[in-house]
Each structure stands twice: as C-alpha cells, then as structure tokens.
Amino acid sequence: MISQNYVIGRVVLRIPWIGHIALFMRNSYGIYLVVFLIILIVIAEFAIPEFSHQKPETRPMENTSEAYGPSY
C-alpha cells in the first residue's frame, strides 16, 4: 500500500465500472464483443440518423424581387 504522503494530485474524473470492462476484454470473446458494441453504437449515432432525416419542404418564393434585392 502506498502512503498518502507519496500521492500527488487529485481525482477529477471517475468512471464507474470501467475496470470490469477491461477485465472482461481479457477473455477470448470479450474483446470481440466490446469492439462489436462500439461499432454498433457508432452506427446507431451517426449512420442511422443520416438515413432517417426527411428532406426539408421547399416553398416557392412569394415575391422574387425581394430575394434578389432591389432592382435599379
């Protein structure tokens, strides 16, 4: 055990249960499962929303002279 006198710094971030994931990844199938889950999360966050967006509706301009500025 290390004495508190030898510890420099302080805790700024704590992620609970991350050590269990690291231990699980030591198994032969654990690393494959964790990589698969990461890929699945990335696909769910980025790829699926791109395909589900509907195209915005386009409305014709009511007065085209306002869109291009004043005519001189």
Image (cartoon, helix red, strand yellow):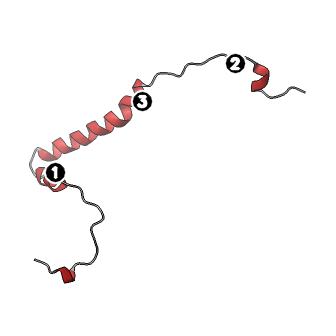
Q: Residue at x 22, y 39 (%)?
A: 36
In terms of sequence position, does the residue under pointer 2 or pointer 1 come before the other? 1
SS at mark 2? loop
In terms of sequence position, does the residue under pointer 2 or pointer 3 come before the other? 3
**Label 2 sits on what residue type?**
Met
Q: Answer few, some or many: residues within 10 Å of disc 1's Cα (few below 14, many 20 plus, some between 14 and 19).
A: few
Q: Position of residue 17 (x, y in %)?
A: 17, 53
Indicate which disc residue 51 carries.
none
Mark 2 or 1: the one toward you: 2
Q: Residue at x 16, y 47 (%)?
A: 31
Q: Residue at x 16, y 56 (%)?
A: 19
Compute the Cα span from label 3 to label 1: 30 Å
Toward the viewer: 41 or 30? 41
Left or right? Give the position of 43 relative to 30: right
Left or right? Give the position of 63 relative to 70: left
Residue 63 image-quadrant placement: top right
- Disc 3, disc 1: CB below 8 Å? no
**16 lies above or below 42:** below
**Label 3 sits on what residue type?**
Glu
Q: Position of residue 68 (x, y in %)?
A: 77, 27
SS at mark 3? helix
Compute the Cα span from label 2 to label 3: 28 Å
Mark 2 or 3: the one toward you: 2
Q: Residue at x 22, y 78 (%)?
A: 7
Q: Position of residue 23 (x, y in %)?
A: 12, 54
Find disc 3 in the rendering and name its residue: 50
**Label 1 sits on what residue type?**
Ile
- Disc 2, disc 3: CB below 8 Å? no
Q: Answer few, some or many: residues within 10 Å of disc 3's Cα (few below 14, many 20 plus, some between 14 and 19).
A: few
> Dividing the image into 4 quarters, which one contains the C terminus?
top right
Indicate which disc residue 61 carries.
2
Find disc 1 in the rendering and name its residue: 21
